[in-house]
Amino acid sequence: MSNIFTTIARFQYTTEAQIIKGRLEADGIEVFLKDHLTIDTDPLVSNAIGGVKLQVLSKDAMKAKHILSTINKYSLDDDGNQIECPNCSSGTVELFSTITNFKSFFAFLVGFMFGTLPFHTRYKYKCENCNTQFSKEDIKLKSNNA
């Protein structure tokens, strides 16, 4: 029973899972990443196979889940402060990448055809509270006007 692993989290990419793995191992919890080699080989299959599964021993599952709950999943600025939505001032803001202009679309096509990573990606923030999408420049404008 003590050698049975339990999945406590899923991640789209290995890098996210490796960060959390390091945090849990620092607290003495044995961690196993399932399907990370498959996703590292072909990231496009991540959604199809359910992402990288972060697994811990069943006896450590509650402790690991508690540690996961203490980790802030929302975006921080360069000084470590939580980013706030310019519309509703909520702190529930996440970073995501987007393809919105010709340059990023062209980079995506080249990357797709040649199997390389994109050369140009635009990043935006999205508020979970009011669904407002904004850029880093919008945050700077709000802080300069305040």
Image (cartoon, grey):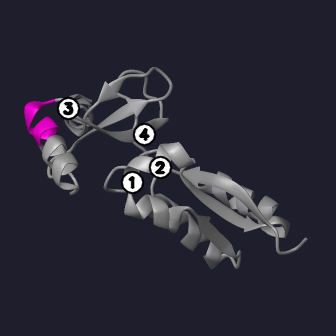
Q: Residue 34 or 113: which is nearer the viewer?
A: 113
The amino acid type found where label 2 is placed reads: Ser
Farthest front residue? 113
The amino acid type found where label 1 is placed reads: Pro
Q: Is residue 90 left or right of residue 119?
A: right
Question: Which residue has dot 1 on it?
Answer: 43
Image height of 54 relative to 27, above or below? above
* Label 2: element kind: helix
Magenta part of the chain: 101-106
Which one is earlier in the sequence, the residue at label 3 or at label 1?
Answer: 1
Question: Which residue has dot 3 on it?
Answer: 141
Distance from the alpha carbon under mark 2 to that under mark 1: 6 Å
Q: Residues within 10 Å of mark 2 (few under 14, many from 20)?
A: some
Which one is earlier in the sequence, the residue at label 4 or at label 1?
Answer: 1
The amino acid type found where label 4 is placed reads: Glu
Give the label, 3 or 4, closer to the camera: 4
Provide residue 18's location: percent of width, then percent of height.
50, 67
Distance from the alpha carbon under mark 4 to that under mark 1: 21 Å
Q: Is residue 12 left or right of residue 10?
A: left
Image mark for residue 94: 4
Verify CB contact (< 8 Å) between mark 3 and mark 1.
no
Q: Does 103 appear in magenta?
A: yes
Distance from the alpha carbon under mark 3 to that under mark 1: 36 Å
Q: Is residue 142 left or right of residue 24?
A: left
Q: Residues within 10 Å of mark 4 (few under 14, many from 20)?
A: some
Question: Which residue has dot 2 on it?
Answer: 46
Image mark for residue 117: none
* Label 3: element kind: helix
Which one is earlier in the sequence, the residue at label 4 or at label 2?
Answer: 2
Distance from the alpha carbon under mark 3 to that under mark 2: 36 Å
